[in-house]
Each structure stands twice: as C-alpha cells, then as structure tokens.
Amino acid sequence: MGRGTNQRDTLLAAAAGGAAVAGSYLVTGWAPSFVVRPVDQAIVNLTPGPIVTLAIETLGDAGHLIHIGMAFAVVVGLFGAVAFAGLRLAARTDRRAVGVATAGVGSWLLAAGLTGISTQALGAALPGAAVVGIGWLRSPTGRPPAGDASSPDAGDSVSGTDSADAAGLTAGVDAVRRRTLAVVAGALGFVAATAVGRRALATDDDPLADAPRSEGAAARLQELDDAALSVESADLHDLVSPIGGFYNVDIAEFDPAVTASEWSLTFTGETGTDRTVTFDELTDRPVEHRAITLRCVGEDLNGRKLDNAVWTGTPIRPLLESVDPQGDCDCAMLRGEDGYYVQFPVDVLAEGFLAWGMNGKELPPGHGHPVRVLIPGHWGETNVKWLSEIELLRVEDDGYWEERGWEGTGEVKTVAKLWDEGITDLGDGRIELAGHAYAGTRGIERVEVSTDGGDSWTDATLSDPLPDADVWRQWRHVFDPDGEHEVVVRAVDGEGARQIRAPSDSSPSGATGWVRRTVG
Ligand SMILES: Nc1nc2c(c(=O)[nH]1)N[C@H]1C(S)=C(S)[C@@H](COP(=O)(O)O)O[C@H]1N2
Ligand SMILES: [Mo]
C-alpha cells in the first residue's frame, strides 16, 4: 500500500465524512436529529462548570462557536473513519460494492446510533456511500489482484517495466488523481450547497413570517407602538424587540423539538395533589397579553441580552394553588426539555406567567416552544423555556447556573443602555442619544444623561409609561456637540433608587456601573 494510496484514501474519507454530515443536515436541518447534536451535547455536558462559566465570561458567544466547531470536527472524523474502512475493504477485495456497502451501512448505523432515528440516518449514509462509490478506483500499480484475468496486464507480457507500461502507469495515476480531486470537489460543493440551500428553505417556510394571529396581542403591540418614543436612529428597536432580533441564551446548541400535542406540564414533589396540564387545558385558561422584558445576568453592563416582547399566556397562580404546594423551603425547581433547571421561591413563581405566544405569533422554537415561563422582574435565567416540570421542593437546591457559580435567580439590577445604533448624527450639527432602561418590577422613573463625563446631568425624555408590571422604557436626549464628549447615562428606578455607580463584572449577580461612552 503506497503513500499515495494512503493520502488519497484519507482525502476521500474526509470528503465522505463532510458529505455525510451535510446529508444529515439536508434531511433534518438544525434539529435534534442532526448528527452533530448528540456529540455537541456530550461535549457541553462533559465540560466542567468553571470552564463553561469562564468561557461565557471571557469569550461570550464565541464559546458556542468553539464547542460546536469541536462537535463538527469529531463527527466528520467519525463518518470519515467509516468511509476509510470502506475504501480499504474495497481495495483488499478489489470490489467497489464492498466499499460502498461498508460505508453506507456503517454510516447509517453510526447516524442512527448517534441520533436514535433510523430513517433520517439515511441522509448521512447515502452521501458517504456515494463518495466511496464514485471515488474508489482500482490501484494503478499495474499489478492485477490475483486471479483477475480481465486485467490488461494479465496476459503474456513478459516485462512489467518497459516504457509502454510506465506510460500506462503514469496515465493511470493521473486518472486516479483527477478522479479523486473531482470527487472531493463534488463533496465540497455538496456541503456548500446544502448549507446555503437548507437555510433558504428554512426562511421560506417560516411559519412565523405571517401577520399577527392573535387580535389581543395585536392590540397590545399597537399600544406599545403608540407609547414608543420617536427616535431618528433607524436601527434601534422601539419598545418591542422583533422575534428575530430578540436575544437568546441556551445551555444546548439545539432547541428541543416539542409539539403542542406532545407537551404537558407536571407539578410534582411536595404537593397536596400532583397534576399534569396539557397544552389544550392551558390555552383554555384565561388569556392575557403582557409586555415582559428579559435581561440575562451574564451580560456586560452595556451588553445586548436585554429585550422586550408581548407574550400571550395565562397566570400561574391559580394552577399552583390547585396543587396545594407544601415543602418547608417554599421553593420550587423548574425544568425544561433541554435538561435545564432553576430553583427559586414559590411566591416568586406565583407571580409568573405561562406563555405560548410571542408578539402575536406562536412561541418560536428558540424561545421555548410550545410553553415557557416568564417571571416578572427576575433575571432571565428564571424564565424556563420548553417548560415540562415544576417540582415543589422540601429543601433548597441549586439550579443549573447556580451550580456553576452564578447568583441569577433574584431581581434584576437597574440599567440604562447606550448601544452603537443609539448614537445618531442628526445632520444639523446635533447628536441624538437614545436607548432603553430597565429596572424590573420597580419600573423606570427617570434616565439622566451627562455629556461632560458626569459633572452635570439632564433628564432624558422617556417613552410613555405602560400598564405592564415588568417592562423597559426608551429614553432620548439630543445635544449640540463641541468636539469629543464623555457621555454617561444612569437610570433611577420607580422606588427612587439610582443605578449602582461602582462597576462590577456580570458574575455572579449581574454587572453594575454606569454606561460611559466617548461621542463626537
Ligand atoms: N430550558 C431553558 N430555559 C432557559 C435557558 C436555557 O438554556 N434552557 N436559558 C435561560 C437564560 S440564562 C436566559 S437569559 C433566558 C433567555 O431567554 P431567551 O433565549 O428567550 O431570550 O432563558 C432562560 N431559560
Ligand atoms: Mo441568562
């Protein structure tokens, strides 16, 4: 077995591995049955908590890219190894069919084993087998495998080293090289086409692209639109974050796929009576459309994990009372279908809301489809998505993030933001500063702006107050710049308390400080 054969087989095997992953993606999309998902999940689960926390603090969203990249590499390697075995068996037996069968059946078993879904595993098996089938060529050494009478060399030729044979050998090597490169290029083309094509498919049949379905939600959206400040900045959200622009924080790279008919919520643990609620039972309950703002405890002071939507759902309190919570700690552990869990007091939970709609649409997969919980005024991590169980506890226990050193189940800290798109040159010499401020259920009373580094302060204009208990406000301030300005913004909450001045990191309980930027 020559070095050339080794390199060729490795190249073909890598192409087959890539094609198998692309084929799986083509069939499943970015879903739980995609072959990369279980491996990614395993990587996330095996990574020690302090490293996860460190990655979030230092790398932010890049941390996700690292583990998903590792998962892709591992899976391409696994399918590549199967294809490599196919190529070697084909060479040993000198039969293409053996290689194709090995690669096809092996990839199918691997994909089915990883995802537990046998039909969609064909998506990975077929492209892998095809690369082996098209890419494999007889060895061009000129020496026929034993007993192959049809080989051009199996005859009465006496000398195997004459010039005609050498030329034939060179031509054979060239043909193999060309074929290998063509197959690898074809596989790469398939990977690229799949990545691009599948994305186009996904946005085309996006069920959330329609107009709002719920009239009640549409009326609330209108109300928020009317309350919004008019700002010049074209890119700044007003009071409602569009679904596609709403931030996302997930412990898993893939959203659990749960249909409304499969879904149920079970109250367990220290209850007078356990209870399971189905989706139909839930949506038959009294419906409300609440504007609720979410903010992640892990975001930087001027970070972007702060958004607001109009959510359609029903209050938790009557359901909770119906199961007669007992338990000495008066606390509950909430669990989601992705394996996430968080614990906090029952009286905080009782203020909560079970939502199945967002901005008038069905709750999207990334935000907890079909049902999530929304807890007014508390950090984002209490708002469990894909909610499946509420366990009433006897003693307190840590949630997923608390096990990893965060203290993010309490009330949000007050913040006023000034993002890049909130700074607009009005073209007439003036500059508009605009942003959002949030203080949970305390509400925002005032936003103060300084354009001289904090020496003097002016009250910003605010959006109209809303009846909702846990919603942000917009602020706006226009000034005449004179060179560079040190702009500082700070909010005062509804209880008269000013945003904490001393800067601190987001870990463990949320960033503090005043947002400060050089403008002009
Ligand atoms: N099931 C589940 N719920 C979850 C999370 C999660 O990873 N899994 N992340 C939490 C965190 S840390 C935040 S900040 C919010 C973010 O909600 P969003 O992704 O809808 O913006 O969801 C919370 N609920
Ligand atoms: Mo969060």
Image: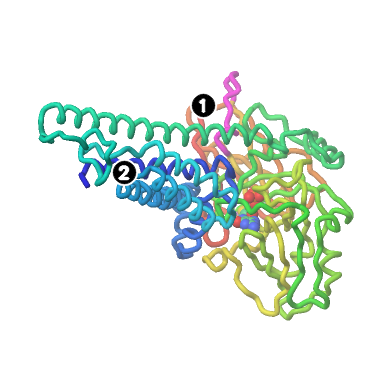
Q: Viewer-proximal residue, 444 or 215? A: 215
Residue extending farthest top: 428
Above or below — where is 443 with respect to 162?
A: below
Residue 314 in the image: state x and y as whole percent.
83, 55
Q: Looking at the rendered structure, which numbered label has been put on residue 176?
A: none
Question: What amino acid does circle 1 point to?
Answer: Asp
Element at label 1: loop
Q: Nearer the viewer, residue 154 or 430?
A: 154
Residue 332 relative to residue 118: left or right: right
Q: Secondary structure at mark 2?
A: helix
* Disc 2 + disc 1, Cβ < 8 Å: no
Amino acid carrying label 2: it is: Asp
Q: In the image, residue 518 lies at what x, y percent?
A: 49, 36
Q: How many marks?
A: 2
Quarter of the figure with residue 324: bottom right
On whether residue 424 falls in the magenta region, the answer is yes
Residue 364 image point, x, y percent: 70, 45
Q: Residues within 10 Å of mark 2 (few under 14, many from 20)?
A: many
The residue that mark 2 highlights is 9
Q: Write down the region rendered in magenta.
A: 419-430
Q: Earlier in the sequence, mark 2 or mark 1?
A: 2
Instruction: State which quadrant residue 7 falls in.
Output: top left
Along the line of sight, which residue is nearer the eye, 37 or 141? 141
For the point 73% across and 81% down, which residue is it?
A: 328
Is residue 299 rendered magenta in the image? Answer: no
Q: Is residue 428 above or below residue 259?
A: above
Give the image quadrant in which the ligand numbered 1 is located. bottom right
* Apparent side of residue 172 relative to residue 267 in the rendered image (left or right): left
Q: Residue at x 11, y 35 (%)?
A: 158
Q: Mark 1 highlights which residue?
A: 482
Compared with residue 103, is residue 475 higher up or lower down, i.e. above or below?
Answer: above
Residue 455 position within the rendered picture, expressed as x and y whole percent measured from the top left: 55, 42
